[in-house]
Amino acid sequence: MRKVLMLGFISLAILSSCNSKKYFKPEIRDHIPAVKHSINSKIKFLNQKGATLNNGEYITKNGSGVVNLGKDYKYINESSRYILSSNGSGNLKVISKSSKESVVVIGLKVPVVTASISGNIIVYLLEDNSYGIYNISNNMKLWEDKSQKVFAIDTRVANPIFVGNSIILPTLDGKLLTLKANNKSATTTIYISAEKTFNNAIILEKVGSKIITASSHGIMTIQNGVENRLRAKISEVIIANNAIYIFTKSGNIIKTDMNLKEITTLKFDFAHYSVVGSYNNKLFALDFKGSLVVLNSDLSKHRIYKFEDVDRYTFISNGRLFKNKEVISLNNLNYE
C-alpha cells in the first residue's frame, strides 16, 4: 500500500526550526510555580480532539475520558452518546458512553485519520484519502468515495462537522466537501489552498453561521457564500473571545476579527509553537525549546515561563498542560 508521509506537532516544529537554525531565547523567564501532579501513563497519540495514553485512557480538550479504549486503539472523536476510536488495522470502534461497551467495530481495512458521528451516522476519512458514510443503526456502509492521492500531510487533520442536514468533510488534499449522508456526490467543493503538500485542514469549526478552516498555508472563513482568506505559514489557530488567533511558523501571533481583519500582531522571534490553548481569558503558547508564553486576550500583556524542551507529545485540556506523565495547572500562571 502506498505510504503517506505524516508529520505531526513536534516533527513540524523541529523541521521549521532546522530550516531557520535559530531558536526563541527570551532574556527573562520566570519559573513555573511548583503546582503539578502526575498521571500514570504517557501520551502515545495526539489529534485535534484529544490525546491517547499508553494505557488506553484518553484526554479531550474538556477533560479526562470516561472509558478505556482498549489495546492498540486511539481516540478519534465523540458525540454526546458515542466515542470513536481506531487502530492501525483500519478498525473503527464505536463505544457507548452510557454502557461503556463497544456498540460495533467497523472494519474499514485502511487506517482511519478522522471521523465524526451525529445520531447514528458516521462520516470517516481514511489514510488513502477515501471517505464514506456508515449507519450504525443497521450496521451498513451507505457509500464510499475517494479523493486525489497525497504524499505528505500534517497529522493535525481536522474532523468532519455536521451542519444541519449536510456534512462538511476536509480531505487530505486540501478540499472542503459539502456532502449528504445519502448521496456521495459533493454539493460544493472549496479548496483551502493550492499547495501540493501539507495542504489538509488542521482546523474546521462552525461558529454561529460561519465556517472557519485553516491549513498550514492559510486560513479562511465562509459565511453565506462569502469567503475571506488570509495567507500565512500557520502553526496553530485558536478561536476565542470572539476573535481568531493565528500562531505562525515565524513566531507571530496575529489577532483578527471573525472575518480575518487584523486587529493586532505580536511577534516572538524564532518561536516554534508545539501546543497552544486558551483558558479563563488567557492564551498559552509553548515553544518547543521550553518557553511557555502566557498572554491576555488583546495581546497587550504577556509573561514567559521557563519550561523544558518539548521532545514528547504535549496537550492542553481544560486548564491543564500535559507533558509525558507531568500535569501542570495553568490556573497558577499569569500574564502580569
Image: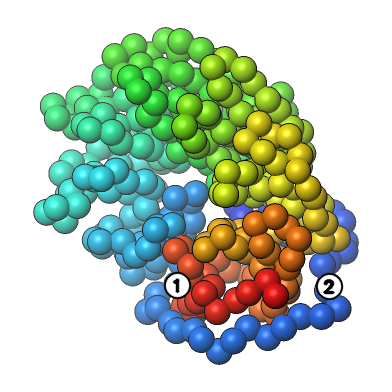
Question: 10 Å neighbourhood of mark 1: few (<14), some, or many (≥20)?
Answer: many
Q: Residue at the spot x=66%, y=48% of the render?
A: 245
Which sits in the foreground, 40 or 280?
Answer: 280
Amino acid on which the number 2 mark rests in the picture: Lys
Q: Which x, y percent locates residue 336?
A: 70, 75
Q: Nearer the viewer, mark 1 or mark 2?
A: 2
Which residue bears the numbered disc 2? 25
Nearest the eye: 280 or 88: 280
Q: In the figure, 184 relative to 22: above or below?
A: above
Q: Residue at x 68, y 71 (%)?
A: 335
- Count of numbered circles on the image: 2
The numbered dot on residue 81 is: none
How crowded pointer 2 is (Cα within 10 Å; few <14, some 14-19, many 20+) is rated as some
Q: Nearer the N terminus, badge 1 or badge 2? A: 2
Cα–Cα span, label 1 and label 2: 28 Å
> At x 15% / y 44%, what residue is drawn?
103
What secondary structure is found at the residue carrying circle 1? loop
Residue 39: horizontal and vertical position, in percent? 40, 78
Q: Quadrant of residue 63?
A: bottom left
Q: Quadrant of residue 198?
A: top right
Please give the label number shown on residue 42. 1
Type of amino acid under label 1:
Lys
Relative image position of residue 199 (x, y in whole percent): 65, 33
Q: Is residue 81 visible?
A: yes
Q: Is residue 299 left or right of residue 130?
A: right
Task: State if disc 2 and disc 1 touch (CB < 8 Å).
Answer: no
**In the drawing, does residue 161 fall left or right of residue 229?**
left
